[in-house]
Amino acid sequence: MTSPADLVCRELTKDFDNFRAVDQVSFEVPQGSFFSILGPSGCGKTTLLRMIAGFQFPTSGDLLIKGNSMLGVGPNKRPVSMVFQHLALFPMMSIGKNIGFGLRQRGVAASEIKQRVGLVLERVGLPGIEDRQVDQLSGGQKQRVAIARCMVLEPDVLLLDEPLGALDLKLREHMKIELKALQAEFNTTFVYITHDQSEALVMSDNIVVMNKGRFDQIGTAKDLYYEPANAFVAGFVGDANRFEGKITAVNGQIVTVQTEAGVSLHAQLTGQGAAVGQMAQIFVRPEAIELSKTALQGADHSNASERIVDSVLFNGANSLVILRDPISGETIQVTLPQTGAFLGLGKGETIYTSWNPAQARCFVDGDA
């Protein structure tokens, strides 16, 4: 028999007066996995996390940890710990006392606390700093201390509420790698909420995209990026060029959409089906668009058009090129490496673009 998932939510719902913050969400998180809840501000992800932690109780539905229902169980009785965005370390306490705080609250003997604090500090890569003060640590060290304070309690599930939000960009990028490594080191189930897609994509085994209190899609980072379930996921996860128009032809899974500018575009249909005359949206990733310095013709060059370079924005390993349609004025974005034939592309140059319909996704309006 397989062991139960560490966390199971069944049709979990939370109402506030006339507002439904979480709307019948159901999911399972396997033991030892890194599970992220990704969504914009106000989508309900924090409310969901607070219900898992026990700070709020659901209006309906059930929530199980290690197979045991948590309905009516307070936060101090649940086998979970939580890392907050602002860490909530006690500035008047040493690092050792910060980490051992929860153990003291549980009445653990001082000798055992000292031993367990020393062990957990070694596991987070900070041995021997028990006597330091909080203000003597870097931002990254504080993050690891906050995780150590949780992990010393040996929770079944660690909840992380946007813990990287207050860090500067370079440290945030570093801590993504650190967090994933720490999760693997402890083999503890992490449930991580964020509005930052790059955090979720880099660290997670599975990600749920949450929108208006509901789950739009659950899958791996690659699933969400390459096979979005609807228009919201396609537009929210990663960068994408978006086109709107009316379907003029359907050929199996490839549809033709005429935009308001009168341009016909071809893309692969996602969803239950499409009919001529329906309104639709097409999404194309910036890296999927091919460039040429000569006009593109023939069946091998679908979605071919002439465009003018509006700007070239240096972005480290890549450049972001903004291209404008000379007739409609519509712009698209293309990602280019800093090497190759298009190095030195300049404002005002004429360029020709195309993309394979199989690398674009079309959603009929109403599927989002």
Image (spheres, rainbow, N blue to C red):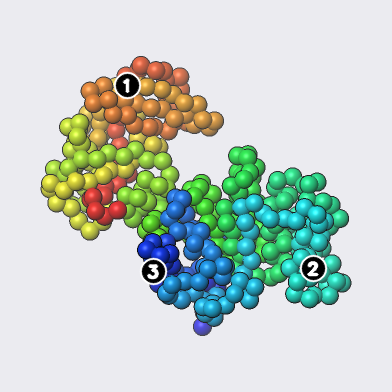
Q: Is residue 269 visible?
A: no
Is 20 left, or right, of 338 in this rendering?
left
Residue ID at (57%, 53%):
162
> Helix or strand or loop: what does disc 2 sit on?
helix
Q: Mark 3 = which residue?
A: 24
Q: Quadrant of residue 153?
A: bottom right
Mark 1 or mark 2, which has the lower sequence index?
2
| Label 2: few (<14), some (14–19) or many (≥20) C-alpha neighbours in 10 Å | some
View extreme (bottom): residue? 1
Given residues 245 and 212, the one toward you in this image is 212
* Amino acid type indicated by mark 1: Ile
> Helix or strand or loop: what does disc 3 sit on?
strand
Depth check, mark 3 against mark 1: the one in front is 3
Given residues 338 and 234, the one toward you in this image is 234
* Disc 2 from disc 3: Cα separation: 40 Å
* Disc 1 from disc 2: Cα separation: 63 Å
Tell me where residue 180 appears, x and y as whole percent: 61, 55
Residue 62 in the image: above or below residue 42: below
Tell me where residue 125 appears, x and y as whole percent: 75, 54
Query: On residue 116, which mark appears?
Result: 2
Residue ID at (72%, 62%):
149
Is 252 left, or right, of 110 in this rendering?
left
Residue 50 in the image: above or below residue 310: below
Q: Mark 1 = which residue?
A: 308
Q: Quadrant of residue 341?
A: top left
